[in-house]
Image (cartoon, coloured by chain):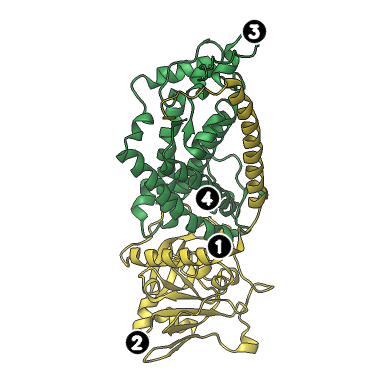
Chain colours: A green, B yellow
Amino acid sequence: MKKRHHAIVRITHWVNVVALTIMVGSGLRIFDAYPAFARRGETFCCYPFEHKSIPANLTFGGWLAGARNWHFAMMWVLVVNGLVYLGFIYTHGEWRDLVPRRGVVRDAWEMVRFYLTVRKDHPRQGKHNALQRLVYFSFPIVGALAVVTGIAIWKPVQLAFLTHLLGGYVWARYWHFLAMLLLVVLAFGHIFMVFAVDPYSMVAMVTGGYKEEWSPEERNARPFVHLLPAHEHAGTTGAPPTPPRTPPTA
Amino acid sequence: MSDSTPRPPRRPSHIAERFAIDRRRFLMASGGALGAAVLAACDSMGPKSATGLLKFAERKNESLERALFRHTSMDVPSASAKAAGSHFPSYFISKQVPVWDEATRGVWRLQVGGMVKQPLSLSLADLASLPRTGYRLDHFCVEGWTAVATRTGVALADLARLAGVQPGAQYVDFESFDDDYHESWDIDSAMHPQTIVVYAQDGHYLNAAWGAPARIYSPVKLGYKNTKYLTRIMFLPRRTGGYWSDRGYEWYGGV
């Protein structure tokens, strides 16, 4: 087993899963109290579902006040947890595996071509492929946007400069909603790829350990293709691997 | 030394077998855990044991919000925002729109009391004769909607000066004739220049739906903190909760 994720990365990852789930659920419950963006007496250009209810089973908190209490408590967990994570990867150098490198767009395009089977062999990669880098790098940025837009709609009078900067309360509320939506899309893309391409990363994110032959690059793995470790699908005959020669016993 | 003898490598097939079971179990377990978490989250209030933590967070948030509070932070609605006018919703808790019945209750008067040197009892005409304060203001509802209206009345800070509020008064309670509706505020928010005892909206005296004869209004508080159908303003040494604050909404409700 090679060490893949430091304990701090693993802990902040799973705390983030819980905090973000509760933030999204309680946020949707709050939004459902008035599922529209337009000021009273006006119309809003850019949301096609004005006044359409959010399905209750996507929400958390039970009712508006309950959801608000959860939202305004869990926001601190989300922020502190995010800062611990960013502080750690900054001081320990892990950010190098996440910040997009030169040519990341081209590399990401190569990954897309590989997933679409246009390209036969898995592009070379380090700890993460170029698509992962882009997603893992944008996640904290979108998270920060969610926090800033959230503050803007929490304190639109006391921190009016911030709300004005975002185009006023109505728009700040809209940006907050979009940031949430983007986080959800990124998270679901991430979860899908974990199960479809690299389930072993679950082991890595729980125990911290990982094996070379598990890596998607070694397995030449596309979604649902070559899920087994590298040495298992390498053979073409299906014959059992020959046992290694045992040293002569004394 | 046993350390020097190389141990036979484990057979890959064993690893593969063992791993296959582990992974299946692992996936099943994680799938089950995920499902349970989703089910638990479905339209639930969250675990009861979290209540204390949520209350703690609310208190800490209130401290932060009070530290952020500035009397100079004013609400200035977007210039392009339309006045909500008749689209302004009317919320009340009574079975019907609360209307002050002069025949049974006599002439409506607003009482200002508690920790004051000179308690006041003001008719609507008295209020209208006092120095007038008016602002075009946003209304921030806890539900998430906003609406713009011009609110006119007497700044609460002016009334406080008139009544001679004593230094120990840290809280203000706004009582109403909408059943038992009331909400209490911190004195800082109450003395904000945009906190107004409102008797007119968009240039007309309030109608019954909007809280006639008078209501408190300030953009520094969420809608539910702004008591309509006002009867009494009490300056008090401690907080006295409120209709929605006692039912789970934040007591501070600052904007």
| Pointer 2 local density, CA inside 10 Å: few below 14, some 14–19, many at least 20 | some
Gap in Å between the C-alphas at discs 1 and 4?
Answer: 15 Å
The residue type indicated by label 1 comes to: Ala
Q: Nearer the viewer, mark 1 or mark 3?
A: 3
Q: Are the two marked residues, 1 and 3, in contact with CB atoms closer than 8 angstroms?
A: no
Left or right for A202, reference B137? right
Task: Single out the mark in the foreground, 3 or 4.
Answer: 3
In the picture shown, does residue A105 fall above or below B111? above
Badge 1 is on which residue?
B50
Along the line of sight, which residue is nearer the eye, B67 or A162? B67
At a point 42% along the width and 28% down the height, the residue shown is A133
Are callouts 4 and 2 both on one chain?
no
Element on which disc 1 rests: helix
Residue closer to the observer: B31 or A114: B31
Q: Read off the residue under disc 3.
A: A237
Q: Which mark is nearer the camera, 2 or 3? A: 3
Mark 4 = which residue? A23
Q: Which residue is drawn at 62% across and 8% down?
A: A236
* Pointer 2 residue: B166
Residue B76 sits above or below residue A235 on the image: below
